[in-house]
Amino acid sequence: MRLERRASVSRSALVLAPVCAVAFTLLVSALLVLWAGAPVARTYALLLQGGFGSVFALSETLTRAIPLILTGLAATVAFKARLYNIGAEGQLYAGALAAVAVGGMHGGTGLEWPIWVLFPLMMLAAAVAGALLLLGPALMKQRLGVDEVVTTLLINFIVLLGVSALLDGPMKDPTAMGWPQSVSLQDDLSLARLIAQTRVHSGLLWGVALAFLVWGLFKYTVLGFDIRAVGANARAAAFAGVPVTRTVVAVALLSGALAGLAGAIEVAGRTSYVTLDMSPGYGYTGIVIAMLAGLHPLGVLAASIFVAGMLVGADTMSRAIGVPTYIADVIVAASLIAVLVATLLTQYRIRRR
């Protein structure tokens, strides 16, 4: 058995591949549901109802999807150039800390910044913090050949230890009765609610706008062409005159900035302060979303809502019929594997010798 590249790939195959992958995932997951002793149809109905079946459910899904959109875009940008950024979790926390440092810790300085100045500075600080955190591993990869998967992954643990130290030290909220959390942002810096009496905030608009901007960057700009060229073959791109190092640096800055913005928007839109459990793995889930989307920025929007809906709906499903919430994690992970295999089969055919 061997894989042989197809001469051409039809558009219908590209459209049907993710659909078939999701159908296969639901079929496989149904076996686990049956093993748990629950009815498959009711389990899936409750899963969808919990994620999308009411205004409240949809609002919770969209709220959960906001940071996933941004970390998914961060992974998409990096992976497009074969810069494997596994550090979006740390970059998210760095962005959240930078946002709080600008928007919550300047009160004792005697400076009264207007909101229209403070809010852009807060977002800029978050983007710069995330970008600088990825810049080092990118330069180490280009100059020294250090594997960025290892460096970005290890930096996550360093950042989380630093967050723990700061939340118990200089950034600790003195009014939190000993609970390790940062000071809060000013109320005026909070993002507006999109739907009354829900947690959906205008960070969703930020995510959608950034997805379209990244799509436009890939499709219509010279930098986007350079990113795709470096991702396809860095040596060939360098031979053709593409500035590989400069392109990788730009990718690192953009990817890290998107992950940093995820932290700032999560703080400004939902929590208003930083805690160690602020992110239940948004940075790592963003990698799954990027792969589910086929590294397409607009596909990240759909993949983020799908994953968020599964995670939110799992709580309702578990309470109603006692099926473990881990079924949702299995569905998401199996979807990723199925999509990767389906995408591979759209580009290659299996030949028997």
Image (cartoon, rainbow, N blue to C red):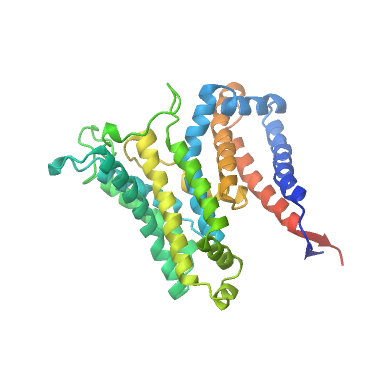
Horizontal arrangement in the rendering, residue 242 relative to residue 269 (left or right)? right
Residue drawn at (50%, 49%) of the image: 213
Residue 277 can be seen in this image: no
Q: Pick out the residue farthest to the bottom.
A: 239
Residue 250 percent location from the top left of the image: 44, 62
Residue 5 can be seen in this image: yes
Residue 108 percent location from the top left of the image: 14, 41
Q: Is residue 47 above or below residue 122?
A: above
Q: Is residue 93 above or below residue 223?
A: above
Horizontal arrangement in the rendering, residue 114 relative to residue 273 (left or right)? left
Horizontal arrangement in the rendering, residue 304 relative to residue 9 (left or right)? left
Q: Pick out the residue farthest to the left.
A: 110
Q: Quadrant of residue 53?
A: top right
Q: Pick out the residue farthest to the right.
A: 353
Residue 41 percent location from the top left of the image: 71, 26
Total number of numbered labels? 0
Q: Pick the residue in front: 71 or 316.
A: 71
Residue drawn at (39%, 65%) of the image: 136
Q: Pick the residue in front: 329 or 196.
A: 196
Residue 57 percent location from the top left of the image: 53, 25
Q: In which quadrant is the C terminus drawn? A: bottom right
Q: In which quadrant is the N terminus drawn? A: bottom right
